[in-house]
Image: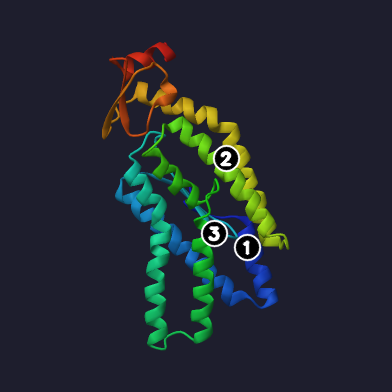
Amino acid sequence: MKIIKFDISFYLILILSFLCGYFKSILILYLIIIIHELGHIFFIKLFNKDIISIKIYAFGGISKYNSLVNHNIFSELLISLGGILNQLLLFIIFYKLYKYNLISNNTYNLFISNNISLIIFNLIPMIGLDGEKIIHLLLEYIYPYKLVNKIMLVISIISLFLFIINCINLKINIIYIIVFLLYRLISYIKSIKYIENKFYLERYLYNISYRNIKYLNSNDISNMYQDTYHFFNNKSEYSVLKKKFE
């Protein structure tokens, strides 16, 4: 099975850019996208996770890998930041290439424009983008997992609405991005209950190691935090979850 896959939108934009005279700009854009995904892959492999697939779209890429819903926040944060960290390194590389006259002024400016645009786009807190994952993980340090999901859903809806308003003069690539983000948002809404139940079930079934311990004065499992073992009114987390699943 091929790990790297190219969406039909990738080929469509590539052909249109060639016909319209923007082929150089698109090649630079896709170079940045590939380097971005390699940043995610580096940390995925560093933390010994199995890569399922890497799919390249017209506007970016998505790296899928095997991981439990329960995770180490720090390692997942590095995986999510990996793409943007690679893009920051590209600034140094392209500056050196430009400084020593290995690339033209036009190529350097195209790179700067595309790289900055992709970093800003990826940092938007919408489901389907790195920005949402990064903020989600940071909030997991502060709030219970279930509450974080609700917060990020609201933030994603607001961000998508503002993104659509900001892109009022819609072009075909922007329309494709909006449709994709809408699809990811709707898919998330449909699966959120499943994801949350999986969060609890994994804790019951697997011997997961946690960095923190938290004591709660209730039996409400919706107050459970990521990367934390809980005691509910002095009862172990396992005994409380056992009642839920048996």
* Of the two numbered discs 1 and 3 in the rendering, the one whose residue sits closer to the viewer: 3
> What amino acid is found at the position of numbered circle 2 in the picture?
Val
Residue 35 in picture, x, y percent from top left: 43, 64
> What amino acid is found at the position of numbered circle 1 in the picture?
Tyr
Q: Residue at x 49, y 86 (%)?
A: 104
Depth check: 134 or 62 in front? 134
Q: Is residue 94 above or below residue 43?
A: below
Q: Quadrant of residue 155?
A: top right
Q: Residue at x 38, y 50 (%)?
A: 79
Q: Residue at x 42, y 28 (%)?
A: 199
C-beta proximity under 8 Å, tags 2 and 3: no
Quick one: label 2 or label 3, which is nearer the N terminus? 3
> What amino acid is found at the position of numbered circle 3 in the picture?
Phe
* Of the two numbered discs 2 and 3 in the rendering, the one whose residue sits closer to the viewer: 2
Q: Which residue is mark 1?
A: 11
Per the model, the C-alpha gap separating discs 2 and 3 is 18 Å
Query: Would residue 161 appear left or right of 105 to someone viewing this image?
Result: right
Residue 112 in picture, x, y percent from top left: 49, 74
Residue 12 in picture, x, y percent from top left: 66, 63
Quick one: label 1 or label 3, which is nearer the N terminus? 1
C-beta proximity under 8 Å, tags 1 and 2: no
Label 1: few (<14), some (14–19) or many (≥20) C-alpha neighbours in 10 Å:
some
Per the model, the C-alpha gap separating discs 1 and 3 is 21 Å
Depth check: 112 or 235 in front? 235
Q: Which residue is mark 3?
A: 121
C-beta proximity under 8 Å, tags 1 and 3: no
